[in-house]
Image: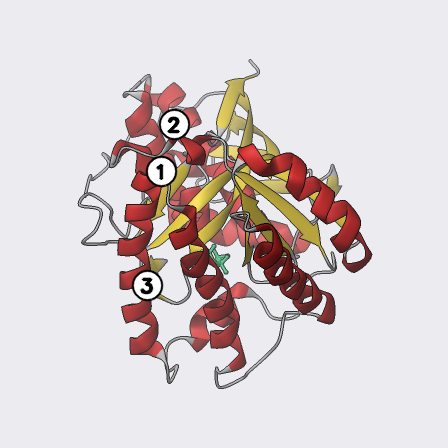
Amino acid sequence: MKTFKVHHCNKKIKAAIKTEAPSNLALVKYWGKKDLQIPINPSISLTLSKSTTQTQIEITPKQNKGLSLDFTFDSKPNKNFESKIKTFFNRVVEYCPWILNHHFKINSKNNFPHSSGIASSASSMASIAIGLSQLENQIYENHPPEKEQKLKASFLARLGSGSASRSIEGPLVIWGESKSFKTSNDHYGVSVSQLIDLHKDFKTFCDTILIVDKNPKKVSSSMGHQMMNHHPFFSGRIAQTVNHISSLKEVLITGNLQRMIPIVEREALSLHGLMFSSSSYYLLMQPNTLKIINRIFDFRKSSKLPIMFSLDAGPNVHLLYPLSIQKKVMEFIKSQLLDCCIKVLDDQVGQGATWSFIR
Ligand code: PMV
């Protein structure tokens, strides 16, 4: 694993940066953690391109040392998000001590519903982390290669939300140590295309998100991760992810989508199965989630098309398929799925976070 240099100097600057980071959808899910945001199993995700958080960060020098931060969401104060970001900053300070010499003004906005099982914490924390890593380069007049800058941003993002470590890069990212991917590690995400020869279908893969309910979910992912600590299926789950990562690696190289379907769907159902079977069991699926899944099964049987579903920690359904069958999938959604959802978000695999300095 790469380690990052911690700069200790009191230089202060005034600067502003705009960033944008996408959400991501895990094909092999991260569920359960130890220590400070260390996953109990490796995960692989598809970086999205249209479902993003846009953030503006302004920093100004200040005298007293201590965390000073104003956060707004959609230009309105949001104490709940502000406290999450303060927790994040308190974890990051060890690696970016310059934070304490500056006052932060941060505004974020999403172009998709937050807290509803589309990984909004991933895009939001990643958009801040990429900003922090770039501001740090500006302060120390240090400009490492872009690949290294992104690894540091992913490392910082992980401290805010584990899955955020996978939103800095694209098109697919692995986070967590795995024997199948030699340089993968628990501390930051690595783009899978740096490790294997990715099949061309995955460079344009589609994810159409069917929003079944956009209300905030009742049980947070943090609670879910915690419930894995004494979960009766803990060791079975770890063994399952080891197999899934290894089989998915083969699929990502060969493009064999028929082999991909059971891996991705089993992952989604296992995630929810772990929720159903934890000590404080709970349900995030809704009747329309199941209706959609059953219709996908029927459609796939009759059409023989390589279309599959995934779920995040929520009731919404992700329809995954190669770009070559997009037209047929759109017809299927229009004719058979619209009555089960309130909104359809078309997304596709993307390249990760971007930034530009304002002044
Ligand atoms: O990053 P967190 O702590 O919000 O956890 C996210 C966990 C899942 O979204 C359910 C799965 C995943 O790997 O993204």
Q: Nearer the viewer, residue 103 or 164?
A: 164
Element type at mark 2: helix
Query: Where residue 110 sits: x, y (%)?
Result: 67, 40
Residue sitting at x 62%, y 51%: 81
Which quadrant would the N terminus be assigned to in this image? Answer: top left
Quadrant of the rendered image containing residue 133: top left
Element type at mark 3: helix
Query: Where residue 127 sits: x, y (%)?
Result: 52, 36
Which quadrant would the C terminus be assigned to in this image? Answer: top right
Query: Where residue 100 sits: x, y (%)?
Result: 43, 39
Q: Earlier in the sequence, mark 1 or mark 2?
A: 1
Marks 1/2 in contact by CB < 8 Å: the verdict is: yes
User: Which amino acid lies under the numbered mark 3 shown in the image of this protein?
Assistant: Thr
Pointer 3 residue: 241
Pointer 2 residue: 136
Tell me how far mark 2 sits from mark 3, CA to CA.
Answer: 36 Å
Is residue 216 visible to the viewer in this orientation of the structure? yes
As displayed, is residue 183 above or below residue 227?
A: above
Element type at mark 1: loop
Q: Earlier in the sequence, mark 2 or mark 3?
A: 2
Q: Is residue 160 left or right of residue 310?
A: left
Q: Nearer the viewer, mark 3 or mark 1?
A: 3
Quadrant of the rendered image containing residue 140: top left
Farthest residue, direction top: 359
Residue sitting at x 41%, y 44%: 166
As displayed, is residue 61 above or below residue 248?
A: above
Pointer 1 residue: 96
Tell me how far mark 1 sits from mark 2, CA to CA.
Answer: 8 Å
Q: Is residue 228 left or right of residue 313?
A: left
Q: Nearer the viewer, residue 107 or 29?
A: 29
User: Which amino acid lies under the numbered mark 1 shown in the image of this protein?
Assistant: Cys
